[in-house]
Image (cartoon, grey):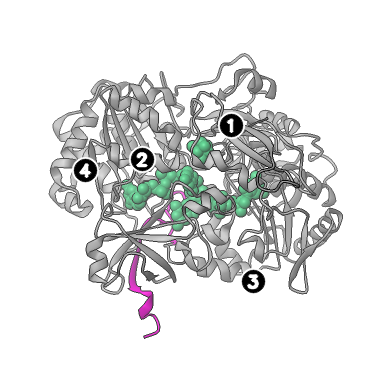
Amino acid sequence: MMHTQCPFCSVQCKITLHSSESTTLHPTLPLMTYQAEGTPNAASQGRLCIKGMNAHQHVFNRERLKYPLIRRQGELVRASWQEVNDYIANRLQQSIQQSGRDSIGIYGGGSLTNETAYLLGKFARVAIGTKYIDYNGRFCMSAAASAGSKTFGIDRGLTCQLSDIPLAKCIILAGTNIAECQPTLMPYFNQAKENGAQIIVIDPRVTATATIADIHLQIRPGTDALLANTMLKIMLEQDWIDHEFIKKRTNGYEELAELVRSIDIEQTASICDVPVALIYQAAQVYAQASTGIIFTARGVEQQTDGHLAVRYFLNLVLATGKIGKPGCGYGAVTGQGNGQGGREHGQKADQLPGYRSIENPADRAYISSVWNIDPEDLPDKGVSAYEMMELIDQQQITTLFVMGSNPIVSNPNIPLVRAGLEKLDLLIVADLFLSETAQLADIVLPVTAYLENTGTLTNLEGRVLLREAARPIPYESKHDWQILCELARVLGQHTGFDFAQAEDVFNELRLASRGGLADYYGITYDRLRREEGIYWPCPSLDHSGVPTMFADSFAHADGRAVFTSIANVATKDTISSDYPLLMTNGRVLAHYLTGVQTRRSATLTAREPENFMEIHSQTAKRYHIKDNDWVEVSSVRGSFTIRCRIKNHIREDTLFVPMHWGGAQNVNQATDPTLDAYCKMPGFKVSAVCIRPASLRYL
Ligand SMILES: Nc1nc2c(c(=O)[nH]1)N[C@H]1C(S)=C(S)[C@@H](COP(=O)(O)OP(=O)(O)OC[C@H]3O[C@@H](n4cnc5c(=O)[nH]c(N)nc54)[C@H](O)[C@@H]3O)O[C@H]1N2
Ligand SMILES: Nc1nc2c(c(=O)[nH]1)N[C@H]1C(S)=C(S)[C@@H](COP(=O)(O)OP(=O)(O)OC[C@H]3O[C@@H](n4cnc5c(=O)[nH]c(N)nc54)[C@H](O)[C@@H]3O)O[C@H]1N2
Ligand code: SF4
Ligand SMILES: [Mo]
């Protein structure tokens, strides 16, 4: 029996994995069979979704990388750790001598444990000395995180607890498909509905989540910012706001009138393509409910105006005073398993551990003291994940080290990303499998999986959880943090990377985060074992953590939250006669991100073996497309070919394609790489495209 935690989404459900020998398949060669069962825990209350139930299948998959690989005469072949470490050290030193430290880029991920994420930041800045480090969370949490920081002074996914959801009388789910993406949370929303809550869903599709909606705003993709401001205008006009809260707890209310002044409700409703009456109803229900929570996820955030769109939704929270008390709050529905912790401890270009800023002299001095280096030697801020791809394409970054991501599938505008990665002098990938990115690498390093690797992960509520190794390390794999320590040593770092176990790394992280916004100092492995999970901030050993934030004050210096009145001037991909349809994208229940893990689970991949495109029947008819036909989808960036599914739960002007497949079926061949000016999130969710039946391709 193994006790573990699901490697996939941000709920971090606890799992008990039972194993037994089975002779039914092969009488002389008994096979181990495994069965996962949910372990009761505060977040998922013992529930598991289909991904969690089958996660172990990829761990035992025969395609797991078994030993390091090195490219010789074009082929990736087996090598020893000694060989690859020496090779990497030589090549990195060469690169540094010839082109400087900033010729090396480091690219991390939100599935890594806090310990590894922390160490990756330290490795980049101390062992390599490069400013170029960023991670896949840029594509995930950057809009909501930067918006929360501006409005509240701090970013923690949920400002309240999951147990507040059933207490809310109105819940807005904007661009979030909880039923497929955090399925074990659905009972909280069902409970809220039973308690009389009105549920408002904002999504261009009638998703599984939208089926519980009382009001569904089936919005035109990319218009959420305008919708939020229209709701605000209605609330201000009708005086459905909490003046006392605004006066006592916020700044910037006076300027708000200017933000919504130019809004003509009829006109904006027509741009969003939602009936005026429905927007009124949504504004009224939320504003007049005694309690309420707004959730946003990638539908709202993966936009060229994602940062401001979230801040406009936060204006609604502040204007109605629905925060800091039971049944109230805001939730940025965090994505990856450690999407929360992964964004706190320094793998982001502008960040140091504990949510410190690399541009703040006091923060630099503190972290330098923990790392025992001169603050002068600490590199400055680098660039965002996609901007790193641009620098790679321009050959300013010539070596890339990827740990826990598959950038050739998950970046926007794959034609540029592929061209860039192929120009690299050296690509090193640490992964469980030969992912699409690892297939291009010069060196591939095999890592341990969730069942084998001890570490902490912070779930969407900001609850820090300990996941302990449940089985021995297979083959020649190593833990991510171990790989970083060994590489640092061969690079000549004789101190600062001599950790014997994950707990030692965590103890340094505690110190590095001490006094920062995301303060983990009071959290220890022993406490996590005893208490199951602790909400940060937790500044001392006798502190119980902070389940509900902002009960009395916000995290800005004066204790007040800030309304946003900045006008939105972002541009988006727009339709034209050549590209007349809007394509959006997202997830399905059975697969996880670029599918490297879930495609190696027989049960999951059997559910969705290939990619597809959802299209409305009227649109399909116009293009002479039948159900299951192959269709070529093109934008100005590139094309892909895919089978279509006719579904009338999508808008007629919109297509939807999951993001879980690479290569010829990769939606990112066509997505928009324009970045949000504030947080550098690409405009993934809106691309102007044209389609034609693939059978016409060669005519
Ligand atoms: N099954 C599964 N679960 C996952 C993941 C996975 O890959 N598979 N990934 C995890 C991760 S890393 C993340 S970030 C989360 C993501 O979780 P979500 O953000 O919930 O997932 P998405 O499917 O990307 O997008 C959510 C919804 O946004 C809608 N949408 C598209 N465009 C727009 C728009 O312009 N406006 C609005 N309002 N809505 C729009 C889509 O129709 C979709 O239903 O899920 C996590 N959980
Ligand atoms: N079009 C479009 N593109 C998107 C999105 C979208 O909605 N639409 N969503 C974006 C979002 S929200 C996200 S989060 C990104 C995710 O994009 P990626 O980071 O590319 O996603 P993953 O598939 O999780 O890639 C993780 C890789 O790391 C490996 N891995 C898993 N666990 C570990 C570990 O512990 N250590 C190491 N070393 N490797 C590990 C896996 O096998 C896999 O190859 O995609 C983004 N791209
Ligand atoms: S994918 Fe998410 S909801 Fe499903 S079992 Fe794993 S952690 Fe839980
Ligand atoms: Mo994500």
Q: Could you classify mark 2 by the number of other residues whose Cα lies within 10 Å: few (under 14), some (14-19), or many (20 or more)?
A: many
Q: 439 or 22: nearer the eye?
A: 22
Q: Of circles 4 and 1, which is in front? A: 1
Q: Is the residue at mark 1 in contact range of ligand 3, meaning its CB lies under 8 Å from it? A: yes
Q: Give the secondary structure at mark 4.
A: helix
Q: Earlier in the sequence, mark 2 or mark 4?
A: 4
Query: Viewed as shown, does residue 619 lie left or right of 59?
Result: left
Q: Amino acid at mark 2?
A: Arg
Q: Residue at x 81, y 47 (%)?
A: 486
Q: Could you classify mark 4 by the number of other residues whose Cα lies within 10 Å: few (under 14), some (14-19), or many (20 or more)?
A: many
Residue placed furthest toward the top: 542
Q: Read off the residue under disc 1.
A: 15
* Distance in Å between CA atoms under marks 2 and 4: 14 Å
Q: Amino acid at mark 1?
A: Ile
**Residue 311: which disc?**
2
**Residue 230: which disc?**
4
Q: Earlier in the sequence, mark 1 or mark 3?
A: 1
Q: Residue at x 82, y 52 (%)?
A: 491
Q: Read off the residue under disc 3.
A: 423
Q: Return the x and y of residue 190 as percentages of the image width and height.
A: 34, 29
